[in-house]
């Protein structure tokens, strides 16, 4: 797979991961609804910085190790694939459940605090680290060209911060929020299907070390 194609595939996979329901989604939505639009946007910025951190770790540390230890490379792909299938099953089972926040409660706004809440939520979530590691292991070439190290972090920031900015804007507006909540079950099940398909791909292609 050409490096440019691999990068685009990684970004698409990370966008799917960001769009799938999880603690980051709930935190951004809660701050946008319960505090203010500014707090929601600050939280989204924190999520973006967290994504850059994980991409840097994957590029400079994890992938260097994986490139030299073939069995670890294959093992992470299988483990990552199994985890993604498990995550997809959880998303599917929880599709019909309402989001865990109270839209009626509002507190004083503090965008700086909301930024740190977003960043700490992203960095403290081990599932995010596993997701990044499995995606990079599955899709990034074992010897990526130099430009990948400069292109991926800002692109990932745009993916993470951009998606959660959309979430913040939507959930701080009445009508888009109502539409999502009305169709939440179907939207979540589509996301679960996409994540499961990616997980199965990792498992099936685990033996193909050079992707």
Image: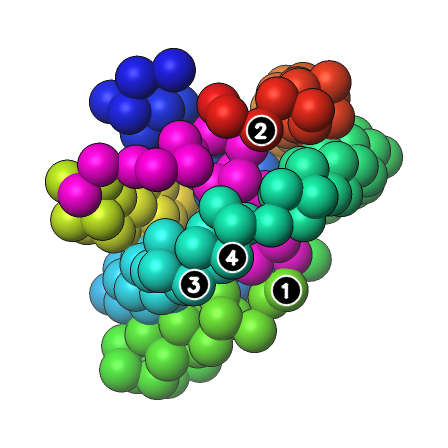
Q: Earlier in the sequence, mark 1 or mark 2?
A: 1
Q: What residue does disc 4 label?
A: 65
Nearer mark to the viewer, of 4 and 1:
4
Q: Are marks 4 and 3 in contact (CB under 8 Å)?
A: yes
> Is residue 116 left or right of 105 when viewed as pictured?
left
Along the line of sight, which residue is nearer the eye, 151 or 123? Answer: 151
Q: What residue does disc 2 label?
A: 209
The residue under the point 67% across, 49% down is: 72
Question: Where is residue 14 drawn, in percent x and y?
Answer: 44, 37
79 w.r.t. 96: above or below:
below
Q: Earlier in the sequence, mark 2 or mark 4?
A: 4
The residue under the point 58% across, 28% down is: 209
Residue 126: which disc? 1
Q: Residues within 10 Å of mark 4 (few under 14, many from 20)?
A: few
The residue under the point 61% across, 22% down is: 208
- What secondary structure prevails in the magenta region? helix
Mark pair 4, 3: CA separation: 7 Å
Please state, as top left, top right, bottom left or bottom right, where the N terminus lies in the image: top left
Q: What residue does disc 3 label?
A: 61
Asked which quadrant contains residue 146, the reply is top left
Q: Are marks 3 and 1 in contact (CB under 8 Å)?
A: no
């Amino acid at each position: 797979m050409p490096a440019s194609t691999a990068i685009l595939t990684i970004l698409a996979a990370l966008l799917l991961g960001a769009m799938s329901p999880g603690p980051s989604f709930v935190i951004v939505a809660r701050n946008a609804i319960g505090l203010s639009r500014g707090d929601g946007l600050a939280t989204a910025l924190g999520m973006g910085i967290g994504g850059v951190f994980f991409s840097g770790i994957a590029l400079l540390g994890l992938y260097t190790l994986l490139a030299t230890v073939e069995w670890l490379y294959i093992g992470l792909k299988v483990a990552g694939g199994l985890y993604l299938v498990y995550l997809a099953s959880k998303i599917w089972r929880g599709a019909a459940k309402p989001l865990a926040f109270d839209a009626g409660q509002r507190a004083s706004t503090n965008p700086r605090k909301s930024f740190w809440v977003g960043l700490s939520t992203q960095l403290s979530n081990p599932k995010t680290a596993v997701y990044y590691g499995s995606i990079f292991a599955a899709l990034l070439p074992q010897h990526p060209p130099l430009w990948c190290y400069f292109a991926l972090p800002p692109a990932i920031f745009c993916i993470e911060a951009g998606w959660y900015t959309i979430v913040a804007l939507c959930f701080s507006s009445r009508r888009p929020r109502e539409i999502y909540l009305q169709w939440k079950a179907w939207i979540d099940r589509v996301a679960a299907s996409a994540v499961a398909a990616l997980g199965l791909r990792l498992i099936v292609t685990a033996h193909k070390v050079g992707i």
